Image: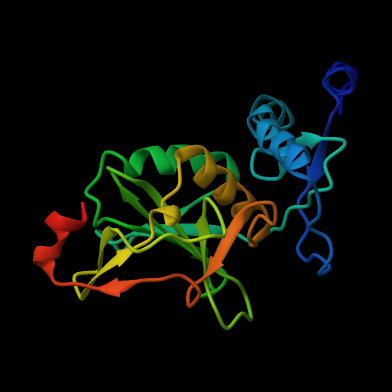
Amino acid sequence: MVANEQAWLRMRKFKPVVLCRRLPNNALKGTRREASSCFAGIPAARPLARALGVAASIVVLPIGCRFMLTMTQFRYSRVSTTRTTKLLPEGAARLLRSMESRPEWDEVHISPGKYEYPFVWLSWHSDRGYVVHHLGENERFSFFLSVQKTMSSPQVFVDLGGQTQELWPPELFVSFDVARTALEYFLASGKRFPEQCWVRIDRFPRRTVRQRARAVAT
């Protein structure tokens, strides 16, 4: 690294983090403030990475962050296509925004290229927000991102792939910023952001309904 780049890093209090393949079970720690700083630092990696010629190998994070990255290569696909596309943490916001201009049924699945788990399944609901569904490696139950632990009664109509229609609690529909934080953390670690609220798939109220109930539910 040249002197100018070293000075820039000292001034900004950022450091380059080399991606590592494996993490110990207790490696992913940090407070909400630290994690937020980590996410804010990710776009800053782009000019430095281009200067160093290692755009795919370096992410710049604040020195105070207790945050580690893996070399897991995540890829995403849409319901509307079988093509998969590489996805890095800095691409999370762009992917989420792109969902807002596509049909709601065109959901997104994200997983390692050669492996089934861990995965995140994303859906966008124009009148409510995003649904973020995560299943970790070697886990029996999947989890949904939620705005809070306490669930209200099922009120929001959800079409599950055209096979089943259900009503879900509104707390399972999150804002862009909440979804972005969760997705960036997942793409960097393969795990759920522990400072966010996650509800196990069998721990929230849901009700199967007929298609005609949608008008009443919404």
**Residue 135, picture quadrant:** bottom right
Which residue is rendered at x = 61% and y = 79% of the image? Answer: 139
The x, y position of residue 109, in whole percent, is 41, 62
Which residue is rendered at x = 81% and y = 69% of the image? Answer: 25
Asked if residue 209 lies left or right of residue 125, the reply is left
What colour scheme has been applied to the protein in the rendered image? rainbow
The x, y position of residue 215, in whole percent, is 12, 55
Answer above or below: position of 162 versus 44.
below
Nearest the camera: 215 or 139?
215
Nearest the camera: 112 or 57?
112
Asked if residue 120 lies left or right of residue 124, the reply is right
Which residue is rendered at x = 78% and y = 45% of the image? Answer: 31
Nearest the camera: 193 or 98?
193
Answer above or below: position of 4 versus 29.
above
Asked if residue 38 lies left or right of residue 27, the reply is left
Nearest the camera: 18 or 120?
120
User: Which corner quadrant holds the N terminus?
Assistant: top right
Q: Is residue 218 in sight in this rendering?
A: yes
Q: Is residue 84 in sight in this rendering?
A: no
The x, y position of residue 195, in whole percent, is 69, 52
How many numbered badges does the structure rendering display? 0
Answer above or below: position of 209 versus 213.
below
The x, y position of residue 129, in whole percent, is 37, 45
Looking at this rendering, what residue extends furthest in the left direction? 212
Which residue is rendered at x = 72% and y = 27% of the image? Answer: 48
**Residue 98, picture quadrant:** top left
